[in-house]
Image (cartoon, helix red, strand yellow):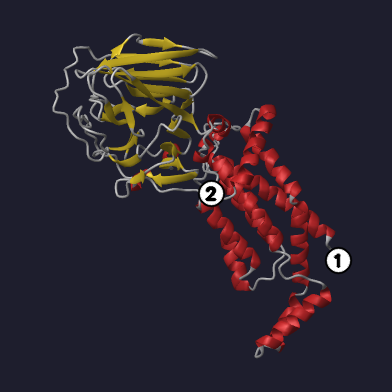
Amino acid sequence: MEKRALLAVVLSLAFFYGYSLLFPAPEKKVPQKPIQQAASSVMVTASAPVQSALPIQQNALVSKDAVVETDTFTAVFSNQGATLKRLVLKKYRETAGAGGQPVALVSGSAGEGYALKTGATGFFLDPDAVYSLKSEMLKLTGNETKQLDFTWTSPQGVTVTKTYTFSGSGYEIGLETRITNSGALPLTGTVTLSLPHPAGAKDKQSRFEIDSAVTRADGKFTTEAVKDIPEKPKKFVSGVEWTGYADKYFLSAILSKDGSIGPVTIEKGNARYLTTLISSPSLEVKTGQATTVAYRLFFGPKDLDILKAQGAGLEQSLDLGWFSAIAKPLLYTLKFFYKYTHNYGIAIIIITVIIKILFFPLTHKSYKSMKDMQKLQPKMTELKEKYKNDRDAMNRAMMELYRTHKVNPLGGCLPMLVQIPVFFALYKALMFSIELRHAPFVFWITDLSAKDPYYVTPIIMGATMFIQQKMTPSTMDPMQAKMMLALPVIFTFMFLNFPSVLVIYWLVNNILTIAQQAYINHALKD
């Protein structure tokens, strides 16, 4: 196959690689039944709970909410189950512009089940109990740290205290669940924590192009499309470091602290929601003693720096593909130039120029090789005609021709193949970088992560690709040449709905390539 055609096909596959299918319509969820167990029983598994023969008391407390406001988010907690009802990020909006609604990473109702509901086996814990709440409003900023405490006591003398800890400027939340046994018998069991997530497509906004259940267990990162979970529940027996849900730009995760996460199950909770159920390791609480299960929670952007600061390999949730070792430095370079340009579009152009300069020697060698092959085309045609009935003799004659004129038939292709990992890596870095989300460029391009609303840049990109193709030395036969002429048209239509940042990168790269080809063609003139 002609070398340039092969390269075009490979690059086409690279760009198709980034897009996911839309997800099925949402379904509906019913609340979980509280799990109870008799005091005389031993620990049981979450899959086969033993129901308590003792009644759970009806809590006379009134359901109410507590609001926590930090520099990065506003969260609403309910004292029914000491759960998280809603969490809204302050620095990110669903759509570009001042009129866009803030991104809500957690948003549920009592019927669907709030996030961070605590259940148990063996501890007489009512998941829907109404907890006592001391403070209904917390406001903190900067380096401040504050706590929100919920307390509930069962008729059997088990006191549960859930304490959330917040920092003024971070996305991390600490959660400690303390079980105190004031009853007459020692208790053995496990504590569970649930994280619900919509099971179907939310809307057609670009951040939901990817919607996955993500988990890191035993040092290995796994991801499963949310739409596939109802048919293929995921289970992790041990070694779970963190688990949660990620879309294209944001992550909701529960992280283990001191081995607090035991078995994890991700499955369809009811008609509309999935549920990640996290169980603690086996716990024993003797009479008059207490035990604590602690977690770290993260609700925030998939910003590489922020994720790395959390530890536990949380940055793996930012999918940068096979060539992440190249994509990460490119992403840091993008941020570096943004500090000086204050425009990610200009930063992309600078990076494109730098990459072009770095690969100039390879490209020069590639074009020189293609030019040399083009000069040999008449002699190659003669040999093909002369040995048309003897393929082995023709191949020997061709190799002799290459040696005589010191031409490498692969010289035009191999240097370009070396650049493909960089193209793949930059594609992933630009496609999934939250920094580019809703970032303006110039004039009509107000969101680099969205398509060009007037399709100006894709059309110009297609035109430059056609010019570049016409300038490139070729040894193709007429049929191959016609096929190659269709590629600019195919790429133009393919790029119409691509994020503007990718089109700008490819457009600038084409313009630089045209200039480079003009220079090389002039330098290699006879």
Left or right side of 244 for 151: left
Left or right side of 344 for 382: right
Left or right side of 53 for 220: right
Estimate the x, y position of residue 524 in percent, counting from the top left: 83, 62
Q: Looking at the image, is 35 positioned above or below residue 318? A: above
Estimate the x, y position of residue 115 in percent, counting from the top left: 33, 28
- Quarter location, residue 1: bottom right
The disc, 2 or 1, on the residue closer to the chain's N-terminal end is 2
Residue 495 circle label: 2
The residue at 62%/61% (across/down) is: 7
Residue 200 visible from this viewpoint = no
**In what element is the residue under mark 1?**
loop
Q: Nearer the viewer, residue 418 or 22?
A: 418
In the image, farthest residue toward the bottom: 389
Q: Residues within 10 Å of mark 2 (few under 14, many from 20)?
A: many
Residue 526 circle label: 1
Q: Amino acid at mark 2?
A: Phe
Q: Nearer the viewer, residue 448 or 72?
A: 72
In the image, farthest residue toward the top: 134
Residue 522 visible from this viewpoint = yes
Q: Looking at the image, is 248 positioned above or below residue 159? A: below
The residue at 70%/28% (across/down) is: 340
